[in-house]
């Protein structure tokens, strides 16, 4: 009696006598995948990969090894592209810069809002529903002709983001790092809205200060030598005080406080339900920031009179 012919379960036209070591179905050479013992079929290999837990950092981020810090690259690229846009269209600063409440003239010029809207002028800003300014302002920078600081504004911010952001992204993972950056940027804008709502503020400084605060928290959580890190934080605080002479200390402080709060939750959330707790804290911070802005804008619009 002749033995029954066995064929590959994925390619019935192929005669084979080799079976998968896991499911024992017959597989042809095209379907064979090397295993520790024998061969496995593609479906069993796929299932095996699903059961392997991906390595995580203590903060919940995926261990990427030598993978490129793509979020840091993307953030730098967005800031540079926005800067190039400013060079081509200088009016972008007034149109998308962070502003709580101001007056826009017929020629696109911004004026200080003093509680009265004169004929020919239009009230603009976050208080007038332009909430997008709270994020777009964080991707704009002073133009090359913007006083003594000028082009150094974006250069210094991008250098700091490059040096610190890569480390923070590597530890937090891409999603957490991006969330931290955006929340820090919002925190800086909220502080501007609360303290200096009539000033137009631009720059990634708030987000960079938030990332720097996270770098400090991460180093403490990992038990690293804090001498150099403490010097870094001290220099950062000194710079925040000195730069208040020509930059928005409100954005710096708001970003620093927001970044510190969020990074504490990312660093010290218990491992059990870690992701859920981190998301809940991030959402809570977002709601808090929104509530503060809503209260401030309500007070600003209530004091406006039309002539």
Image: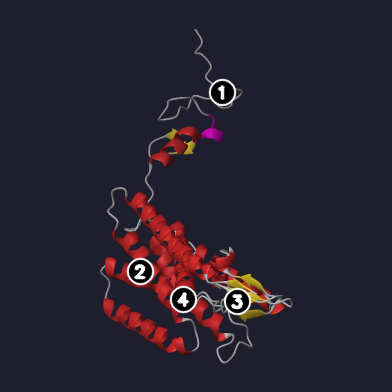
Residue located at (32% from left, 78% from top): 229
Mark 3 or 4: in front is: 3
Residue that lies at the very extreme toward the top in this rendered image:
1
Q: Position of residue 101 (x, y in %)?
A: 56, 73
Q: What element does badge 1 sit on?
A: loop
Q: Which residue is mark 4?
A: 251
Q: Residues within 10 Å of mark 4 (few under 14, many from 20)?
A: many
What residue is pinned by disc 2?
A: 260
**Which residue is labeled 1 in the image?**
15
Residue at (39, 53) in percent of width and height = 279
Q: Is residue 141 left or right of residue 119?
A: left
Residues at marks 2 and 4, CA–CA distance in whole angstroms: 14 Å
| Mark 2 Cα-neighbour bin, 10 Å: few <14, some 14–19, many ≥20 | many
Does residue 133 appear left or right of residue 36 in this picture? right
Cα separation between marks 1 and 4? 70 Å
- Residue 48 position within the rendered picture, expressed as x and y whole percent measured from the top left: 41, 38
Q: Quadrant of the C terminus?
A: bottom right
Nearer the camera: disc 1 or disc 3: 3
Q: Which residue is mark 3?
A: 116
The answer to whether the residue labelled 2 contacts the one labelled 4, judged by CB atoms less than 8 Å apart, is no
């Amino acid at each position: 009696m002749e033995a029954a012919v066995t064929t590959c379960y994925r390619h019935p036209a192929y005669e084979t006598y080799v079976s998968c070591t896991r499911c024992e179905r017959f597989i042809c050479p095209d379907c064979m995948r090397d295993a520790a013992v024998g061969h496995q079929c593609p479906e069993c290999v796929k299932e095996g990969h699903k059961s392997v837990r991906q390595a995580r950092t203590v903060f919940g981020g995926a261990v990427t090894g030598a993978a490129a810090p793509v979020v840091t690259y993307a953030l730098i690229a967005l800031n540079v592209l926005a800067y190039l846009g400013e060079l081509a269209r200088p009016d972008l600063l007034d149109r998308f810069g962070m502003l709580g409440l101001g007056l826009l003239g017929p020629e696109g010029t911004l004026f200080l809002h003093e509680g009265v809207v004169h004929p020919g002028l239009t009230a603009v800003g976050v208080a007038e529903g332009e909430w997008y300014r709270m994020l777009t302002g964080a991707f704009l920078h002073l133009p090359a002709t913007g006083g003594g600081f000028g082009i150094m504004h974006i250069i210094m911010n991008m250098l700091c983001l490059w040096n610190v952001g890569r480390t923070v992204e590597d530890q937090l993972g891409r999603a957490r790092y991006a969330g931290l950056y955006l929340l820090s940027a919002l925190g800086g804008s909220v502080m501007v809205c609360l303290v200096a709502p009539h000033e137009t503020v631009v720059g990634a400084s708030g987000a960079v200060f938030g990332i720097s605060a996270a770098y400090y928290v991460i180093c403490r959580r990992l038990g690293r030598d804090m001498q150099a890190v403490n010097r870094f934080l001290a220099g950062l605080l000194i710079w925040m005080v000195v730069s208040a002479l020509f930059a928005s200390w409100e954005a710096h402080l708001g970003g620093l406080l927001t970044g510190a709060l969020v990074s504490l939750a990312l660093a010290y959330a218990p491992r059990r339900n870690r992701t859920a707790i981190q998301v809940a804290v991030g959402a809570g911070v977002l709601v808090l920031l929104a509530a503060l802005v809503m209260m401030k804008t309500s007070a600003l619009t209530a004091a406006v009179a039309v002539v």
